[in-house]
Amino acid sequence: MSTAQQHLSLSPEAAVAEIARRARLLAAAEPRRVVIGLAGGPGVGKSTVAVETVKALNTGAIELAAYVPMDGFHMKHKKLEALGTAADKGMPHTFEGTLFAEFLGNLKGAAGPVSGPGYSRDIEDTVDNAFTVLPEARVLVVEGNYLLLADSPWYAIPPLLDLSIFLHVDRDKVFARLLKRHAQALGGGFTEERNRAHIARVDLPNYDRVEASAGRADIRIDIVSEA
């Protein structure tokens, strides 16, 4: 990873265009599959930027890029309940971090199709075989909160990234986004009191922890938007 971090301020649309541009350059320069990592705290828009970047890269006849979400490696809700940590869901220790690093390493060198898990907010749990990366995909666009953490098991992920990008959105804006997200989860099954408590105890501490890892990225992008 680069020691001289680039710092940009871009709209979400401009961020997608810039990330796609850099991904094309990397793919053209490397004979192997390359991995673009999008890190950032909860509510900064990582998944949206990642999905739109993949769309931008896949405008031709061949699908150049594939979307790989870290959220599919949440621990299963039943496992969290068994461990007594269901209320912590979203914190680093509630993820299968070692499995995610192994999956990403295998995926980077895979010659055939590989399926991976996703996360559904409709059921608030992981879904097996939610996506499939085809052999022709030259670029993996990976996104997740903890891609740049330095502690175990997350330290195994940065060496797998050919380009790491940190997305930043101000904390107060993130709070409003998270309130909306939780209100929509489980078909609106959570109370506002529960949502505010979860954001205060889990999401915002996660945001602060992830923000502390921003300096490890090759590029930091401050996302400029109205919402």
Image (cartoon, grey):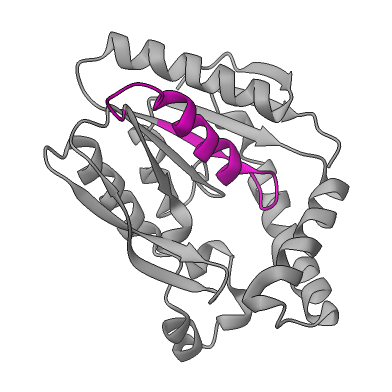
Magenta segment includes 72: no
Outermost residue toward the left in this view: 111
Vertical side of 69 occupied by 78: above or below: below
Residue positioned 88% across, 49% down in the render: 172
Residue 22 in percent (x, y) is at 47, 15
Q: Give the x, y percent position of residue 131.
A: 33, 53
Position of 130 relative to 112 (above/below): below
Which of the 4 image quarters holds residue 29?
top left
> To which quarter of the image does residue 194 belong?
bottom right
Q: What residue appears at the point 39 percent right and 69 percent down from the top-left corner?
A: 127
Query: 23 above or below 76?
Result: above
Q: Name the residue: 55% across, 29% down.
A: 165
Q: Residue at x 80, y 67 (%)?
A: 200
Pick whichever, 122 or 179, lies toward us.
122
Q: Is residue 197 left or right of residue 124?
A: right
On the image, which quarter does residue 222 sit in? top right
93 relative to 175 in the view: left or right? left
Q: Where does the C terminus fall, quadrant-wise? A: top right
Residue 116, image x, y percentages = 30, 56
Above or below 185: residue 33: above
x and y percent of residue 56 in the render?
Answer: 48, 26
Residue 56 covered by magenta stretch: yes
Please give left or right for residue 167 compared with residue 136 in the image.
right
In this rendering, the count of numbered labels is 0
> Where is the N terminus found, in terms of image quarters?
top left
| Region rendered in magenta | 36-63
